[in-house]
Amino acid sequence: MTETAAGPAGRPPDLLFCRRCGGSIARRDLLAGRALLLEGRAFCPACAALTVARRETLRAAAVSGAILAAAALGIAAWAGFRASRDAAVLARAAGERAAAAERGAEAAALRLAAVEAEARGLASLGETLGRTVESLKKDMAASREGIDDRLDGVERSLGALVEAVEGLRREVAAGRGPAPPLSPAEEKEFLARLDSVNTGERFEALWRLQRGKGEGARAAAVKGLADPEESVRYQAALLARSLVVAEAVPALVDRLEDPSAAVRAAAADALRRITGKDFGFDPLEPLEGRRAEAVHRWKEWLKTR
């Protein structure tokens, strides 16, 4: 289990320890996207890239192996089918040759027609198998490209937070003692900032509202999950988790399909905290089909609430 050092009340821990190397991780590294928090396990900046790359490399190898195995099975089936067809052709030809003396020229014509038909069938089979092999090759290339695209998406998602939290680093590093809850006036001020055109102000407002106690802070989490900027959606998911906002569950389930891996990871973590459920969702799963299956299970569960 990853050890943590308790932070000020209403804020995440200031210190974690890397699951891989055991080194300490400052909370500012998590906010800056240099460190990574996956399924309750923390990884320092040095180990985060290695961990993500290793996961995706293993998944890519597994997908490629499965496709190659399917292609090999198809080729083996084709070879067996052709051998059995050839044996049938030879047997039929032998029977026709035995009766050739009685049937004469008519039998010879029939044999020729049978051979031509068999040749056309084998040619058609060869064309079909050729198209199948080409299709498998294209699917394999598409899988590799999809994995590369999703790795790029993870990197962009983690880097998107850097600009938004730049103005908060000094305050986080110099923090002293538990932060007091927001006063009604302060909470009102930060709620108003959620309508700002400045992404950084919306992000900071959601971060500070973690010290909020009113219904406004809870409603802000739901509103922030629909923000067009991924860094704001990410912070809204953290706010929903911090305040255990049950009314944000439907919006969090929608964010499991977010194009940003960082937002998907934060939403999944919030859902686990609020509902105690998981349904096997992996925010870094490179195959959309597998993620979609887990999202479907979440949506079916929502219908029973």
Image (spheres, helix red, strand yellow):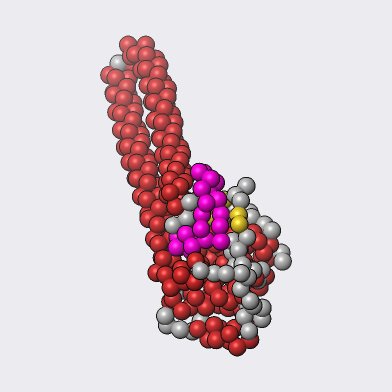
**In-image side of 205 versus 297 (left or right):** left
Residue at the (44%, 43%) spot, across then down: 54
Residue at the (46%, 68%) spot, across then down: 169
Q: From where the camera sits, is residue 303 visible?
A: yes
Q: From the viewer's perspective, is residue 256 above or below residue 21?
A: below
**In-image side of 48 versus 176 (left or right):** left
The percent coordinates of residue 23 (x first, y second) are 51, 48
Q: From the viewer's perspective, is residue 291 above or below residue 32?
A: above
Residue 29 included in the magenta stretch of the image: yes
Most foreground residue, 63 or 12: 12
**In-image side of 192 versus 164 (left or right):** right
The percent coordinates of residue 93 (x first, y second) are 36, 17
Farthest residue, direction right = 305
Name the image quarter holding residue 211.
bottom right
Q: From the viewer's perspective, is residue 297 above or below residue 174?
A: above
**In-image side of 2 versus 47 (left or right):** right
Residue at the (58%, 76%) spot, across then down: 209
Residue at the (72%, 66%) spot, across then down: 305
Tell me the magenta residue range.
14-33
Residue 18 included in the magenta stretch of the image: yes
Image mark count = 0
Q: From where the camera sits, is residue 290 visible?
A: no
The percent coordinates of residue 177 (x first, y second) are 61, 69
The percent coordinates of residue 115 (x first, y second) are 31, 25
Q: From the viewer's perspective, is residue 54 above or below residue 270?
A: above
